[in-house]
Amino acid sequence: MKVKRSDKKNFVQKLKDELNSSSSVIVAHYAGLSVLETDKLRKEMRDNGAKFKVTKNRLTKLALADTPYESIADLFSGPTAIAYSSDPVLPAKVAVSFEKKLENFKIVGGSYDGEKIDKSKIYFLATLPSFDAIRGKLLGILMAPAKKIASVLQAPGGQLARLMSSRSEELGKLN
């Protein structure tokens, strides 16, 4: 089936736009993966806020031109797929997890904020907490003082209520 030139241009431009809004790109070889395994990988990426695409190397190299990820163009040979996201950690986490589970899925390299990275750096990225996890921890840290202030402010009122209750019980026993 022949693909129209305009469809190729649209694909290249769309991929270029998506890459420009990404913080990291993971490149992997997927030869030998079943359709079911590929679908599982794609779903896991999507569920974690990342995208996974099986790519045509020539078109992907065109999309990489004039992006921060131009330096990884040499990684595109053979059956290649890419994972990318605005969160630099998420595609690395899912890709590393799948590489450990599937022998036919091999990470070959990638890029983080425009810097070409190797497999060891991708494994390191996978160990870091995601932006959402960091936000949650930061929010917890910020909320802790507010909770302490609220409990300190409530304490005198609680003490006063207990004092009045015990005094009321004492008066009730006297009558």
Image: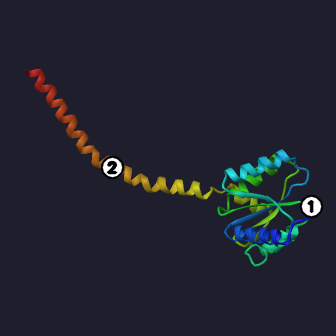
Measured from the top left, where is residue 69 in percent x and y? 76, 72
Residue 2 occupies quadrant: bottom right
Residue 40 lies, with reference to residue 17, above or below; the image says above
The residue lying at 72 percent from left, 49 percent from top is 44
Disc 1 vs disc 2: which is toward the camera? Answer: 1
Task: Determine which of the numbered discs, if any, sits on residue 150 in the image.
Answer: 2
The answer to whether 68 appears left or right of 143 in the picture is right
Mark 1 closeness class: few <14, some 14–19, many ≥20 residues within 10 Å? few
The residue lying at 19 percent from left, 35 percent from top is 163
Q: Nearer the viewer, residue 51 or 96?
A: 51
Real-space Cα distance between discs 1 and 2?
A: 67 Å
Mark 2 closeness class: few <14, some 14–19, many ≥20 residues within 10 Å? few
The answer to whether 77 appears left or right of 101 in the picture is right
Q: Which residue is mark 1?
A: 1
The answer to whether 161 appears left or right of 28 in the picture is left
Residue 47 lies, with reference to residue 13, above or below; the image says above
Task: Determine which of the numbered discs, if any, sits on residue 59 in the image.
Answer: none
Q: Secondary structure at mark 2?
A: helix
- Amino acid marked by disc 2: Ala
Q: Secondary structure at mark 1?
A: loop
Q: Earlier in the sequence, mark 1 or mark 2?
A: 1
Measured from the top left, where is residue 79 in percent x and y? 90, 60
Q: For the N terminus, give its image quadrant.
A: bottom right
